[in-house]
Amino acid sequence: MDSTSFYQKPETTDEFREFYKRLEKKNAAPLWENLAEIVPVQPRPRAVPALWRYEEIRPFLMESGKLITTQEADRRVLILANPGIKDRPQIADTLHAGLQLILPGEVAPTHRHTAAALRLIIEGDGAYTTVEGERTTMYPGDFLLTPSWTYHDHGNLSDAPTVWMDGLDFPLVNYLNTSFAERHPEDVQPVTQKEGDAHARYGSNLMPIDYKPPSLSAPIFNYPYARTREVLDQLYRNGPLDSWHGIKMQYVNPATGGYPMPSISAFVQLLPSGFRSRSYRSTETTVYSVVEGRGCSEIGNSTFEWAARDIFVVPSWYPASHEADKETVLFSFSDRPVQKVLGLWREQTV
Ligand code: 1HN
């Protein structure tokens, strides 16, 4: 019996095949021939565990900077394409991840779409993203949101290339046939708020009185790394260290305590030098970006050695353990909120 199914297909005879042919003409099919495929006994993602080394991808990113302008490309992004998913480039079954380059002086025009996006800044100081009229300047390690249907654009006023990882939920959004997208009536939306307003108003353990969240996403759209790093340092000093996760925290919507966006969760974790995590798996698809450090991860039967700025993916239900050769900070994002709301999310320490 196929170990991925509780059900064994009946032997197919000529009589069956002839029946199936006639059935197909009527746009119908026998469930018993498809049951094993339709109801696997455990998740069977198409995506496989995979790693992208920044030092290998960066030259291609810079080459793309010579080939096409941001204006021409709209967004100059190299998609991280999972080798297990052949028909379209995406990092995993439910999520997109890519590396976006914006060169000094460039502007990526304003648009909005129903897919939700996040950024994790990888290289460069001083480029900005504007979300719904408020700019935020970005530094390495910063975690940014552009929630569903918010107007956003990017610009680079610094004198160095800026690179970030994009994470989007559009494989999910497209699966549900819920994608809408449009450009802003102007090439670049007007800036209507002072920089830092959202953070002061909603991100400082204070809320405007009578505040009612107008959307399912966080009202702040930058979680600066400087503050996050201090927190990780302090929590490491205070302990305890979790055997599976090190010091792991989740990013929250400060207005609700919930996920930053309704479809995407995000996490940051510190693994001390020499730390070896125990093995863990969950049903969520998780994309990791190494913010600092060096080490390796065992994912399923494969081992991946990583360094700062590398990206790797752990598809649903693959056991993963991480080892840090020096103090490491991992950022990660996943589709956990969608699984939770459907009552499907599972985890297991293995
Ligand atoms: C998008 O709008 C951005 O706004 C980046 O920076 C990556 C990947 C797929 C679809 C839309 C951006 C994207 C994207």
Image: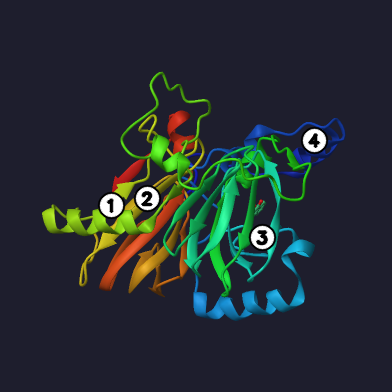
* Nearer the camera: disc 2 or disc 4: 2
Residue carrying label 3: 89
Q: Residue at x 73, y 37 (%)?
A: 180
Q: Residues within 10 Å of mark 2 (few under 14, many from 20)?
A: some
Q: Quadrant of residue 82?
A: bottom right
Residue carrying label 1: 248
The earlier-in-sequence mark between 2 and 3 is: 3
Looking at the rendered structure, which numbered label has been put on residue 267?
2
Q: Residue at x 45, y 51 (%)?
A: 333
- Residue 198: image location, x then y, percent: 46, 40
What distance separates the C-alpha of mark 2 from that of mark 3?
24 Å
- Residue 23: image location, x then y, percent: 81, 33
Q: Quadrant of residue 104?
A: bottom right
* Nearer the camera: disc 1 or disc 4: 1
Q: Residues within 10 Å of mark 4 (few under 14, many from 20)?
A: few
Amino acid under label 4? Phe
Tag 2 and tag 3, C-beta contact below 8 Å: no
Q: Residues within 10 Å of mark 3 (few under 14, many from 20)?
A: some
What distance separates the C-alpha of mark 4 from that of mark 3?
38 Å
Callout 3 secondary element = loop
